Image (cartoon, grey):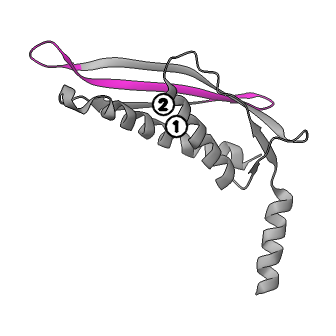
Amino acid sequence: MVIILLLTAFLSLALSKDFCVGNIQNPYPDPYVEYVFRKTLERALLESGHRIKCTPEAEKITPSVDLIKETPIAYTPQQRVSAYNLEIRVSLTLKEKRVFSALVSYSLPDGSLGDLPRRSAIQDAFNIIYTEMLQFLGRR
């Protein structure tokens, strides 16, 4: 049993690649999107069996935020926006560019919640993107 576990651990280390994650190219002034994007990418890399290590042999990943678009979809009787569609499109460039996107709705019941509903929608969007990203990185 111990031999099987050691063999499995050795094979997983031998078959894993080193990836170096570069700075996120983000033309939008939203540091929270960058934070969630980096955490999602790092989680997908680690869960797909790879290592995050910036060595000369490591394959470089250039992440970029291509689109953050919030579209109003509902108004209150006082003509204030109460719900949005949040569209996020990000890409990873390894040898080729791969685009991931998600569309999530969120509502603002009142102003007392600040930007918490928006941050929750960003996390939801990256949870959707995460599954595609995990499949993409798992094939590398």
Q: Which residue is mark 2?
A: 32
Q: Compared with residue 140, is residue 92 higher up or lower down, i.e. above or below?
A: above
| Horizontal side of residue 121 vs 32, given as left or right | left
Quadrant showing the N terminus: bottom right
Residue 50, numbered circle: none
Q: Is residue 77 magenta?
A: yes
Residue found 81% across the figure and 77% down from its top? 6
Residue 84 in the image, given as x and y percentages of width and height: 31, 23
Residue found 51% across the figure and 26% down from its top? 31
Q: Is residue 6 visible?
A: yes
Residue 56 in the image, given as x and y percentages of width and height: 90, 38
Classify mark 2: helix, strand or loop: helix
Classify mark 1: helix, strand or loop: helix
Nearer-the-camera pick, 69 or 39? 39
* Residues tagged 1 and 2 counted as in contact (Cβ below 8 A): yes
Residue found 78% across the figure and 42% down from its top? 19
Q: Is residue 98 visible?
A: no
Under mark 2, the amino acid is Tyr
Q: Quadrant of residue 106?
A: top left
Q: Quadrant of residue 93?
A: top right
Q: Main secondary structure of the magenta part?
A: strand
Residue 86 in the image, given as x and y percentages of width and height: 39, 25
Under mark 1, the amino acid is Val
Q: Which residues are magenta?
A: 74-99
Query: Callout 2: 10 Å neighbours few (<14), some, many (20+)?
Result: few
Residue found 68% across the figure and 47% down from its top? 45
| Residue projecting furthest to the top | 79
Residue 36, numbered circle: 1
Q: Compared with residue 97, is residue 77 higher up or lower down, i.e. above or below?
A: above
Nearer-the-camera pick, 37 or 95? 37
